[in-house]
Image (cartoon, rainbow, N blue to C red):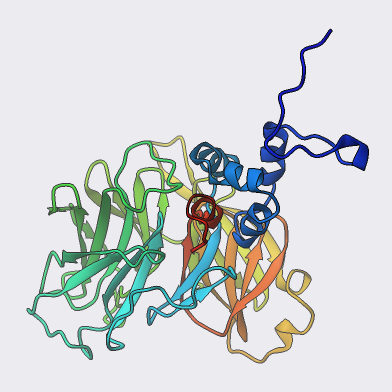
Amino acid sequence: MPPPTPPMDEPVPVNDGFLRLTDELVEEVFFRLGPDEPSRLVRASAVRKHWRRILADAGFCRRYREFHKTPPVLGLFNEDTSFVPTSALLPAQPEWRPRRRTMAAVDCRHGRALITPYNRYFGDFGEGEPFDLTVLDPLTGHRRRVSCPDNNVLWFSAAVLCAAQGCDHHGCQEGHFRVAFVTTDQQKRVTSGWLYSSETRAWNKLSSAHHHNVTKYTFNQRVPSVLVGDAIYFNIDGVIKCDLGTLRLSMFERPTNVKGRLMTAEDGGLGFAAVVDVTNLTLWSMETGLDEGAMGWSKLRVIDLSTLLPDGVLSIPMPEYEISCFAEGSQVIFISIGACHMVDLKSRRVWKVSPPGRKFFPYMSFYMPAMEAGSTGQGQ
């Protein structure tokens, strides 16, 4: 005689036409609820108390993140630090906002946003005056201030990233972080950089990168960055590589002079995307040759935007169609054409996510409201 089936907390009668599902099968179903819209988990937790306990379990939350691997885009930071949520559960504004519009978002990564003074020329800070950078958790409002490494800098770009070795970055906002800070001296034609550690609370100076194609009109203010391996890349007068292990800056050319964005390539390496010939989205990938580590760009593919975007979008008169940003570690880009459209190059799905904007910084993170709802009886 087979052993009896262990009773569930709330058994579902088989003779009513319902199947008895084990917790493992229920979890497998919940894993398929996409993380880009956390409200799906909230609705599932409201169906049955037993389901709520499953969703509230820390082990399920960990396995859910491991299943999806890449955190979803939950919102967009505009340059003026306004926040455009792409999920119904997230607030239209983070809990923290500057008192005056003198601050700007310059980067978003690993569940954190990096906020800096908007413009040293027109803001509250003059040359030689100290100022702070702010590392912000948009969901909790928790923030850390970091003093600028060089008070004489007027124009700069910066990036924030998790400092933990081997981290999967699924929920590390509360851990230690690093900030990369770069600036170009137009007269000396040299880019300098610093790397901050929240663990030591100190800046380390990076080696400088010298180059010859700097113009006096090039200001590396709020240039988006991309993290690939153990290096941060900035699109400044070419591509500036900040090696986090050797603390060395180096420079190489872009694949085209057309305005574009660095991104994550399909193979996980460094990529570049630009709209060429009016409506052709062209993608490149960085390759390392066999000749003493020589680097070069390889064109991957060309996508006709008229076959990708909704009908009528390209009829909007604009001087140029611009890539606003990309979602790091994925094939999701954002194109500004009348409005900002989120485009998944892999699935070819397109969403209109915000009003027009020239520069956004995607906020990517796993948000598990069902976990709080299951343990406290209410969502966030």
Quadrant (top left, top right, bottom left, bottom right) of the N terminus: top right
Question: Of residues 334 and 98, which is closer to you in this image?
Answer: 98
Q: Does 27 sit above or below residue 279?
A: above
Image quadrant of residue 280?
Answer: bottom right
* Residue 238 visible in image: no
Q: Residue furthest left?
A: 128
Left or right of 309 on screen, residue 60: left
Asked if one can make out residue 124 in the rendered structure from this viewpoint, the answer is yes
- Between 296 and 149, the residue placed more toward the observer is 149
Question: What residue lies at 26% left-to-right and 57% top-to-bottom?
Answer: 179
Horizontally, residue 186 falls left or right of residue 374, namely left
Q: Residue at x 32, y 58 (%)?
A: 160
Q: Where is residue 12? Give x, y as percent.
A: 80, 39
Q: How many marks?
A: 0
Residue lying farthest top? 1
Q: x, y percentage for residue 173?
A: 36, 53
Residue at the image point whose x is 26% and y is 81% from the top: 216
The quarter of the displayed image where residue 5 is located: top right
Foreground: 135 or 335?
A: 135
